[in-house]
Structures are given as structure tokens and as C-alpha cells.
């Protein structure tokens, strides 16, 4: 009789439903990465799913980012609207409802060229967008691209 190997014990990490959903979104994104034509429509679909206030900010951010940095490609990243250069996400918008937080976030990855000294912000809480905010975001996006 042959010895059959014992199956390894499974350990389960404790992720929230929202985190598991984001991971599932990421798997779908990786599978669809070859089809860049649908990337922007995926971003617009994710924006359409947001609550009214987040949707308004996300639409405006989408327009600002596209105008400020045409070299960036819209795509989704963990189910969030994101903007990439050479396949690397530089910035993304996380709606407040995504992880049940009290404010939306405009975040920048470590690939963004925002380094300033030994400490700099890489995410900004958003409750609404003013003209000054839009100008600052435009400047940040341009700097992030390098």
C-alpha cells in the first residue's frame, strides 16, 4: 500500500468582505489586462456604481487627471478607478463606500514622483472638490508623472 501524503493544514486570513471583494476585483483586472480598449469603460462603470457624492468627485477627478496627464492610462485597480503609466499605477480614487470610510481618498503609489525630503503625503482625504483643490490635484498629477 502506498503512503498518501497528508494534506497541508489550511489557515485562513481574516479579511473583511470589502477586502475580499477588492482582491476578487484585482484578479479580474489581471485577467482583463490584455484588453486595454475596455479599461476606460471599466473605470467609468466603477464610477457609475458609486454613491452620488463620490461619483461626482470621481467623474471630476477622471477629467482632471486625463487633462493634466494624457500619458496616463485609466484602468481599475482593486476595483477602484486608477491611472497608470507604463503599466504602473500612479494614482487612484477610493470612494468612501469602498471600505466604509467617512471620506473618499485620492491616493498615489510609490511609483509616483512626489518625493519631497524625507516625508511627504501619498493620500488625500476628499469630501468635495473646490477650484483650489482641482488646481492642486492637477499639479500633483503632473508631478507624479515626472
Image (spheres, rainbow, N blue to C red):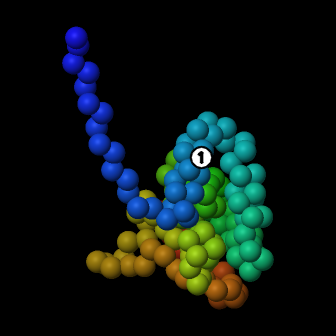
Q: Measured from the top left, where is residue 135 in percent x and y? A: 64, 81
**Does residue 76 appear to the left or right of 123 in the view shown?**
right
Q: Residue furthest top?
A: 1
User: Is residue 121 visible in the rendered structure shown here?
Assistant: yes
Q: Which residue is under mark 1?
A: 29
Q: Measured from the top left, where is residue 141 in percent x and y? A: 56, 69
In the rendered view, would you say 139 is above or below 29? Answer: below
* Image quarter of the N terminus: top left
Q: Which of the 4 image quadrants contains residue 140?
A: bottom right
Residue at point 78% right, 77% down?
52
Q: Residues within 10 Å of mark 1 (few under 14, many from 20)?
A: some
**Number of numbered callouts drawn:** 1
- In this view of the protein, which residue sits in the foreground, 74 or 105? 105
In the rendered view, would you say 65 is above or below 54? Answer: above
Residue at point 29% right, 77% down?
118
Residue at point 41% right, 61% down?
14
Q: Measured from the top left, where is residue 117 in percent x and y? A: 31, 78
Mark 1: secondary structure: helix
Q: Measured from the top left, where is residue 72 in percent x and y? A: 61, 56
User: Is residue 33 visible in the rendered structure shown here?
Assistant: no
**Does residue 10 appear to the left or right of 142 in the view shown?**
left
**Does residue 16 appear to the left or right of 67 in the view shown?**
left
Residue at point 38% right, 57% down?
13
In the rendered view, would you say 80 is above or below 25? Answer: below
Amino acid at each position: 500500500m502506498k503512503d498518501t501524503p497528508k494534506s497541508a493544514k489550511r489557515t485562513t486570513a481574516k479579511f473583511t468582505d470589502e477586502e475580499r471583494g477588492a482582491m476578487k476585483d484585482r484578479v479580474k483586472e489581471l485577467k482583463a489586462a490584455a484588453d486595454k480598449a475596455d479599461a476606460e469603460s471599466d473605470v467609468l462603470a466603477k464610477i457609475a456604481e458609486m454613491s452620488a457624492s463620490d461619483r461626482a468627485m470621481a467623474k471630476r477627478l477622471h477629467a482632471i487627471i486625463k487633462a493634466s496627464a494624457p500619458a496616463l492610462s485609466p484602468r481599475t485597480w482593486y476595483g477602484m478607478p486608477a491611472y497608470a503609466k507604463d503599466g504602473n499605477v500612479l494614482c487612484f480614487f477610493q470612494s468612501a463606500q469602498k471600505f466604509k470610510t467617512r471620506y473618499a481618498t485620492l491616493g498615489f503609489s510609490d511609483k509616483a514622483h512626489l518625493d519631497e525630503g524625507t516625508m511627504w503625503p501619498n493620500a488625500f482625504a476628499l469630501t468635495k472638490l473646490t477650484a483650489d483643490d482641482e488646481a492642486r490635484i492637477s499639479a500633483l498629477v503632473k508631478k507624479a508623472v515626472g
